[in-house]
Amino acid sequence: MNNVYTMQSEFLGRKDSEKARRIRIRGNAHLRNFEYESAVEAFNASICHALPDTQELRNGFCDRAIVFMKIGLLDEALDSIEVALLVKQTDAEMTQLEEFRKNILVLKERQNSYKIGSINSTCDIEEPKLSHNSHKNVPFASEFIEIQENEKFGRYLTAKKDLKPGEIILLEDPICKVLDREFIYKKCTHCLKSNNFNLIPCSQCSVAMFCSNDCMNARKNFHKYECKIMTPIINILCDEGRIPWISLRLLLMTLMYYPEMDELANMYHNLTKEGQKEKFEFKNFNYMSATGPEYIKYILNLAMKEPNGDEEYDEIQKMCTLIVNLLAKRTDLKTKINRTHHKKLLVEILMKFFYVNMANNFVLVSYPTWMEKSDTLRHELFGSALYLFTSLINHACVPNLKVKFIGESNSKVMIYVTRPIKAGDQLFITYKKTISYLMADKESRQSVMNTEYGFECTCSACNENYPMLKELQRLDLCTDQEKALLQMGCIEIQQKASMDVAKKSLPKFAEIMEKYSKSYPSIDCYQIESLLEYCMSTLYRNRPFMYE
């Protein structure tokens, strides 16, 4: 990953066929070392940098086709050759490509005849469904979830009835999602799918690729503006970790939903004017019938992280001012953002989105790819997303819910119950794995919560100072029969990792968890909860977890 990041930092910018050639040379070095993922990523970067209708563009697609052919992705190899054939070239080069294409077709016919499998990025997975009927206003949430609000917790969610371990209560797509810069040659900029790395370059810039013509056509909403300002933003600000990419996307959504600046100004004025703030009713918000402007109001009313002092505030204000000025100067929005007070308004809204995002965004996680073998289950943080309803769930260092990212792009949130929840109890997730009571002591957790989220956690793990994982006691709760069941389930999950095993084991593990949950926290409960997670991961993920 470090080599790839260096490559991107060095070559990020406008299209340049000489840069494309140098990146492609690196790709061929990876290919010779059988580093297929790194090779195809480099070839994608080369394709993205190559000028249209040039030999370097043709070479990039040809080299990518070679990688696909070597690993058995023959449809993807054919796609790359078909695109290469469209590039202007000599008759001899055309003949060479046609011969390459025929060879792939022969291999494809042989593969079909002998039913030879190819390496694939996905396996059959269960389509998750809510465990209850859907909420009347929130079609992707359980009917047994209720929005509450008070001074201590703000807006939060509670259970309307008892909820059992393993029950799925929320399946939400993000309102906004963006790709981290390290993955621009590995996933689609629009939908975030990898599409087996079979991606199409943006015709205007070298910092975005798409998985299909549909996603490329969708660029008119956002990326046609982003691609004209991303490179200068990166070059000027340098520290990509501070650049509010998702906040920029939210601002572009706002400008799309509010075509008139005066209308936007009136809406924002009504939401923010002291003493006359418009009351926003989260409890009655209908996610099925809401309009674009209503979604923007919703986001602007979410909880915000407070700035860490005047110095940070000034820094964020300068960054947001730069972004708005670039939008006004370099994009088609210049006719819309043509007055000083309009720019000032957009800077203020962009800053608001920045601090809303700081308090509510989720980091998206993907897992080992099919191209490179790995003995460990390394995971990659490839993007970030904002979820409207999930943002209402509060943090606890000892949660009663678990968040999983599922779907082809690993951006759909699935939330399920990990421990029994009584009617009226508040629902909790852990905002970060590193601030779980299992991973960090109370002092460390409180420090992170204050610095990154701006509040002090008062969950049971903090109030009662729960021991960390390494200090948990084993209570030896289970009967011999239950121990045998858990051990057998663990072995089967490791050896078979099949959906049938997971489906059969899940209700048994959930029943045992419900029986002994009052002994939480303990090693016994942790292990049962872990087995529940492995079952859910095997059923709904692109690849199973292994038992730790």
Image (cartoon, rainbow, N blue to C red):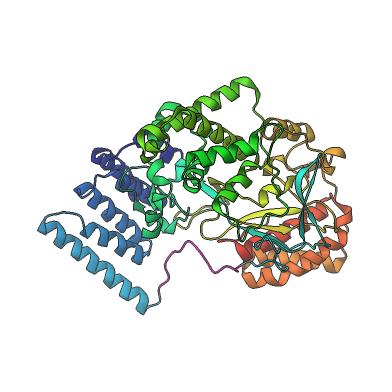
Is 391 on the left or on the right of 520, as rendered? left
Residue furthest to the bottom = 113
Q: How many marks?
A: 0
Image vertical order of residue 303 relative to residue 139, above or below:
above
The residues colored magenta run 116-127
Question: What type of secondary structure mainly makes up the magenta span?
Answer: loop
- Left/right of residue 459 with respect to residue 251 in the rendered view: right
Residue 315 visible in this rendered orientation of the protein: yes
Taking the magenta stretch, the answer to whether it contains residue 312 is: no
Taking the spot 15% from the left edge, 60% from the top edge, the residue there is: 94
- Give the residue furthest to the top: 311
Residue 350, horizontal then vertical, whole percent: 54, 35
**Could you tell me residue 498's position as x and y percent?**
62, 69
Left or right, 184 with respect to 433, comes to: left
> In the image shown, does 405 or 483 lie closer to the viewer?
405
Residue 362 visible in the picture: no
- Give the answer, above or below, for where 526 lies relative to 497: above
Residue at 55% x, 55% y is 410
The quarter of the picture where residue 437 lies is top right
Q: Nearer the viewer, residue 94 or 163?
A: 163
Residue 117 on the magenta segment: yes
Q: Answer above or below: position of 497 versus 325.
A: below
Instruction: From the top left corner, tell me how far across and down residue 214 is, in percent.
Output: 39, 59
Left of 433 or right of it: where is 77? left
Relative to 500, residue 78 above or below: above
